[in-house]
Amino acid sequence: MGIETPLRKLEIIGNGTTSILKANHSNLISKGSREYVLSVREQMLSNRSFKVPEDWDVDWNIRLGPIWTPAELGSTNLVCWLSPEYYHPLDTDADIIAQANDRSGNGVIWENTWTSASCPTFTSPLNGFKGMGFDGNQWIYSMDESGDGELDPGTGDFSITMLVEFGGISTAEKYVLCSDGTKDFALSVKEVSGTDMYKVYFDGSATTAALAVNVVAPVILTVGRSGGDQFLKLANLSINDTNITGTESVDIDNSQQFFIGGKEAFVDRSAGNMFTGNIYEIMFYNGTLSTDDIKNLEGYLAHKYAQTSFLYSAHPYKTNPPRTGVPA
């Protein structure tokens, strides 16, 4: 059973053979001692999936169930999950993000050791959560994966979902995310004929999306490759709207590092191609995500960050967040 997230508070009540662990507004009733409850509490605080032992009685709201999180997709698809709870400040400056750890449990580490000035900074809170801020001179990159294949789908399907807030966009292309300097895969934004547009790269070749970038409010988007076709989807449009088309089987393999905020940023930072804006949360998946999976991700982000107005009117989670463990 997953724990409701964000997990803001844990309390222990009782000291006998049965103790109660209170998580947010729900009670988890242990069948063990207080010491056992304490040990499980520590596991819950460090376990990225927030799982509790199967022999526990769980007292959730019987109608709603706990809030669904990206961990529900499990290791089959989720290969890296960056969220504010796992952004770590520089030892000497609490405003600078020195490292971002993977919340999925796969151990992907992101950092920037170039200079402290080139690291992203913490943003102002969005519904209580601080994201990564980029001012056009900052980036963060995944460490050498040594062939692990964590962010490397090869020629297969993959999907990346994020909550992003765009800053200044100009005729100089701004790279939000890039697999490497040759742009085997990249997502960028650029002013084209006076309109801010999305661009998706595969094998160095770009396709411009037939829609404009929203620079007024945070945006929930999903980009990647499905069935060999490249795609870009926005949560404020119907999930069936595919705004990038074309088959691309370019190999994205373990020789590459992924960059957030630029394309091989320490080489290209002088070209004015660095991203300006904020990224609050981002999830990487290898394999194919279903329509329901993507809708769940959109609903999770929209409700966590209080951005439900961005969801299109018929979105299944426009009013209520996705839930898990709901009885039939």
Image (tube, rainbow, N blue to C red):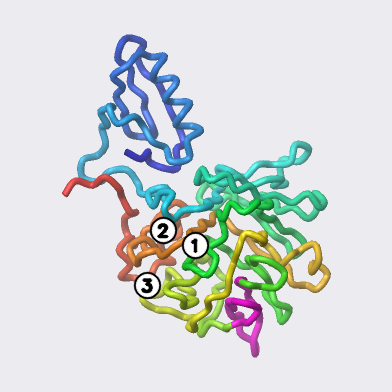
Residue type at tag 2 = Leu
- The answer to whether residue 1 is left or right of residue 90 is left
SS assignment at label 2: helix
Who comes first in sequence, dot 3 or dot 2?
Answer: 3
Task: Kindly identify which numbered label has been placed on residue 297.
Answer: 2
In the image, what residue occupies the spot 37% across and 71% down? 312
The residue that disc 3 covers is 239
Magenta span: 185-206
Q: Crowding at label 3, few (<14), some or many (≥20) Cα neighbours within 10 Å? A: some
- Residue, far left: 328
Measuring from the top left, give residue 71's x and y in whole percent.
42, 47
Who comes first in sequence, dot 3 or dot 1?
Answer: 1
Residue type at tag 1 = Thr
Q: Are marks 3 and 1 in contact (CB under 8 Å)?
A: no
When the figure is inspected, residue 178 is found, relative to residue 191, above or below; the finding is above
Measuring from the top left, give residue 182's x and y in whole percent.
70, 73
Question: 127 or 236: nearer the eye?
Answer: 236
Task: Kindly identify which numbered label has been placed on residue 295.
Answer: none
Residue 195 in magenta stretch: yes
Q: Crowding at label 1, few (<14), some or many (≥20) Cα neighbours within 10 Å? A: many
Residue type at tag 3 = Ile
- Residue, far bottom: 193
